[in-house]
């Protein structure tokens, strides 16, 4: 019996997980960063350039484009579907050039609406990169604003809610994996709110650059064909009409520096989110959080009791994949030999994959956070088992008392080190030590009333302040 070739099955089976197993998470990016979206954006850019040239009156005596003709041309973008994709494929089979196929499709549309007298203005004075750089920029802007930023905001919102809910919940901190000065769980979530919010705002303020200045960025063909026109101004107003920032000086390509900057910011956000994923995994392992089981779900194929932290593990892996691609994109795209090479062409086709793994990870983090319940019993047990963390405030008070001239307060660190280092200390031993110091009454009272659970400083206030700042 001959084995079925999976590549021949219809409908086609996806090679990659983003178009297969994880399609639901990645699908919103298809409208912005897929090959089809790139071609739709190319049509959009070509049509708008065509209209812009006529509205700018760069050729005296050429007739105006009627409103209905503009509407029908712009309809190519609005009605872009499988039929349009097939048309482009048919043209590209002849041209063996994707941008030229777009040009031919628009010229055919002009013929259908009776405007073929203007057809030679399509792709006028453009190199392919004039169209491509603008098309990618438009797609990137849409993907960030409509897909990625809302997912990132959802994550920060979830963290902010947990920071607020757990602002007063004390926890034993762990520095170097060892018991350390207590905090509150809410304050620790607020740290991630603060870190991610800074990167979010950088990404939110991204400038998306574009150019349309000809084969080597000199407007050479433009100035020969229409010498009396201020072509840099025509180009700038067009790029800005697309919602982009004008890049006034380039080679054949837009230099992609803005893309490298964006990808570095995205990767940094990813890496902070990766830190969150590993911290949450650890808190779950420490039993500080209990995972709420999903009804009917299986944690392990052989151990029925398990509820695995799969959302955080999935996020961790996908953030690593996303960062690897973003780093590669950023380092590759800033280099182009002399006035042009094509390394950027194939590289940019992977932008959607890099975004897809990030979006998938962010969705998983939000889902994972939503299935957690705080385990205050475990938190309190750890606090009650580590009274030695009060060595810090005791020696700090002794330092203050020394500065005020109280006798016997010298070498406080060494005295507390002898008492606490390397072994557990009971509440009674701590209080006995405090009582024997000869501290002023107000100092002694404050220390005697202190417990690991109350030694959290202004952690709760810090958490609430950060949450308020994010929501403002």
Image (spheres, helix red, strand yellow):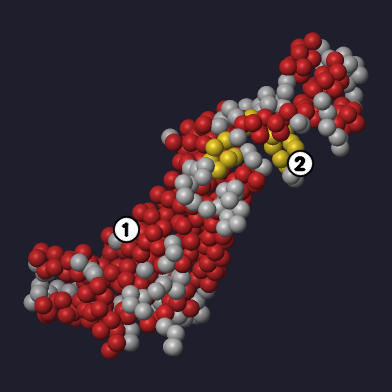
Q: Position of residue 260 (x, y in %)?
A: 50, 64
Secondary structure, mark 2, is strand
Is residue 280 something one can see in this rendering?
A: yes
Mark pair 1, 2: CA separation: 52 Å
Q: Nearer the viewer, residue 67 or 326?
A: 326
376 versus 246 height, above or below: above
Q: Which residue is mark 2?
A: 178
Residue at 32% x, 58% y is 243
Dot 2, crowdedness within 10 Å: few (<14), some or many (≥20)?
few
Q: Exactly how many numbered labels are in the figure?
A: 2
Secondary structure, mark 1, is loop
Q: Position of residue 380 (x, y in %)?
A: 67, 30
Marks 1 and 2, the one that precedes in the sequence = 2
Is label 1 or label 2 in front? 2
Q: Nearer the viewer, residue 350 or 409?
A: 350
Residue at 28% x, 89% y is 94
In this rendering, position of residue 464 left or right of residue 170: left
Q: Which residue is mark 1?
A: 243
In this rendering, position of residue 352 left or right of residue 81: right
Residue at 23% x, 69% y is 80
- Residues tagged 1 and 2 counted as in contact (Cβ below 8 A): no
């Amino acid at each position: 019996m001959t084995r079925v070739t999976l590549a021949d099955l219809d409908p086609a089976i996806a090679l990659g997980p983003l178009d297969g197993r994880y399609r639901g998470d990645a699908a919103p990016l298809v409208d912005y960063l897929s090959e089809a979206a790139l071609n739709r954006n190319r049509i959009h850019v070509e049509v708008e350039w065509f209209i812009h040239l006529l509205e700018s009156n760069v050729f005296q005596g050429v007739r105006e484009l009627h409103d209905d003709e503009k509407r029908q041309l712009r309809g190519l973008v609005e009605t872009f579907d499988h039929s349009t994709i097939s048309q482009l494929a048919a043209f590209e089979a002849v041209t063996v050039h994707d941008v030229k196929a777009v040009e031919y499709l628009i010229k055919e549309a002009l013929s259908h609406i009776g405007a073929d007298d203007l057809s030679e203005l399509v792709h006028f004075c453009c190199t392919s990169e004039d169209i491509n750089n603008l098309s990618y920029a438009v797609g990137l802007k849409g993907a960030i604003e409509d897909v990625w930023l809302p997912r990132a905001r959802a994550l920060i919102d979830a963290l902010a809610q947990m920071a607020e809910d757990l602002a007063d919940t004390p926890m034993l901190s762990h520095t170097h994996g060892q018991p350390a000065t207590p905090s509150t769980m809410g304050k620790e979530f607020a740290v991630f709110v603060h870190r991610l919010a800074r990167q979010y705002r950088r990404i939110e303020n991204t400038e998306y650059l574009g150019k349309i200045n000809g084969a080597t960025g000199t407007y050479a063909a433009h100035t020969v064909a229409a010498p009396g026109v201020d072509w840099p101004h025509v180009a700038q107003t067009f790029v800005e009409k697309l919602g982009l920032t004008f890049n006034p000086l380039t080679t054949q390509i837009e230099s992609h520096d803005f893309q490298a900057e964006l990808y570095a910011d995205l990767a940094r956000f990813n890496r902070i989110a990766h830190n969150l994923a590993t911290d949450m995994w650890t808190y779950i392992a420490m039993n500080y959080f209990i995972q709420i089981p999903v009804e009917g779900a299986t944690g392990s194929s052989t151990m029925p009791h398990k509820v695995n932290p799969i959302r955080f593990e999935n996020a961790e892996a996908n953030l690593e994949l996303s960062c690897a691609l973003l780093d590669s994109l950023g380092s590759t795209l800033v280099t182009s030999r002399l006035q042009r090479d094509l390394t950027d062409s194939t590289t940019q086709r992977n932008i959607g994959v890099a975004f897809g793994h990030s979006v998938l990870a962010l969705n998983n983090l939000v889902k994972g956070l939503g299935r957690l319940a705080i385990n205050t019993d475990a938190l309190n047990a750890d606090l009650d088992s580590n009274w030695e963390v009060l060595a810090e405030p005791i020696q700090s008070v002794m330092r203050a008392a020394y500065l005020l001239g109280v006798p016997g307060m010298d070498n406080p660190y060494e005295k507390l080190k002898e008492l606490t280092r390397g072994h557990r200390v009971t509440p009674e031993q701590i209080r006995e030590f405090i009582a024997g110091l000869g501290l002023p009454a107000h100092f002694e009272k404050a220390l005697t009333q202190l417990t690991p659970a109350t030694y959290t400083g202004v952690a709760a206030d810090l958490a609430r302040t950060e949450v308020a700042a994010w929501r403002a």
